[in-house]
Amino acid sequence: IFIAGELGGRGLIKNAVEQGRQATENIVKSIKKNHNGAYDLIIIGAGPAGISACLTAKKYGLKFLLLEQDTLGGTVFNFPRKKIVMTSPMELPLYGKIKLFETSKTELLELWQSTLKKNDIAIQENSKVDSIAFNDGLFRVTTFKNEEFTAATVLLAIGRRGSPRKLNVPGEMKEKVAYRLLEPESISAKNIVVVGGGDSAVESALLLAEQNNVILSYRNEAFNRIKPMNSEALKIAQSNNKLNVRLSSNVISIDDDCVVLSTGKDGNEITVKNDLVYIFAGGELPIQFLEKTGIKIEKKFGETVMKH
């Protein structure tokens, strides 16, 4: 089993694309030519790493299958439609040099779709993998649709997000709570709380603030993990009173028409009027699935280490 992309610590699009290519080239060198599997390679996950891997597999003449639990793009597909994907020039197999510095999610997905179509590559979407077993020299990949496929090798390009990380507060199961933002332009005149301190939270809050009353709640004292461009945009929005930023704050509970926040070092509680809540607290590493495949998960100095 090979690992590429975000799951292996290479979350940036350029890095994920490069690692998908490198992993597949290593598979080409190591694969047993006389195996009895239906495929040489099964790629799980159609994000940047998975797309690059299948293009590389096509280039080298491997018989492969690309399985995706949702749709083309993986994590990128779930970005807001207007999100600018920050990337730098990169080499995409069977396409060549992509000279992109700033491009939208839509443009990037269209580029991937056209490249796959040109090379006659189909993705088996909505096929979430349930288990991966190894016996008689072959991997047996089973989906939740009870489909079973065999291959000599497997490449995991499934990302780290898994399921969204929850706040575990009262009211979090209400319909007005969401963990991704797809079409911010369709939301207007709402009172919204966005929770999180990463780029996804900041970008979503900025997009929503164009037409709504938005509070950005973050548990820490400063935004230390965001891109410089987002940091600057955040400062401008605050100075123009377009966005209400609440640092050192936590959601206590979510009610039908309000949200209760604790703020400051003293944890004073405030109640704010609210219509929608968007939570960007990261995702849980799909540990259970990985362990089922025989990958050992260890914690070392706060980092997750995977061994097969």
Image (cartoon, rainbow, N blue to C red):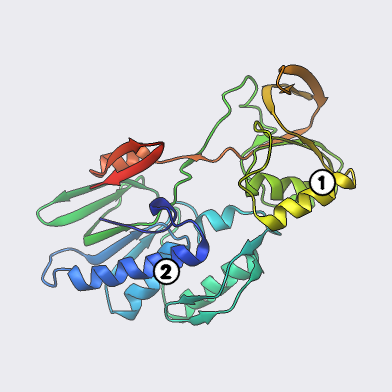
The answer to which of marks 1 and 2 sits earlier in the sequence is 2
What kind of element bears circle 2? helix
Image: 70 above or below 262: below
Q: How many marks?
A: 2
Q: How far is disc 1 from disc 2 in space, using C-alphas?
A: 35 Å
What kind of element bears circle 1? loop
The image quarter in which residue 196 lies? top right
Between tags 1 and 2, which lies in front? 2
- The front one of 205 and 108 is 205
In the image, taking residue 101 as reference, residue 217 lies left or right, namely: right
Tag 2 residue: 18
In the image, taking residue 167 as reference, residue 32 lies left or right, namely: left
Please give the name of the residue rendered at 78% of the width and 24% of the height, measured from the top-left corner: 258
Q: Position of residue 22 (x, y in %)?
A: 34, 69
Image: 210 above or below 50: above
- The front one of 122 and 237 is 237
Please give the name of the residue rendered at 11% of the width and 57% of the height, measured from the top-left corner: 137
Tag 1 residue: 209
Q: Is residue 31 visible?
A: yes
Please give the name of the residue rendered at 23% of the width and 47% of the height, measured from the top-left corner: 308
Q: Position of residue 27 (x, y in %)?
A: 25, 68
Density class for disc 1 (Cα within 10 Å; few <14, some 14-19, many ≥20) is many
Density class for disc 2 (Cα within 10 Å; few <14, some 14-19, many ≥20) is many
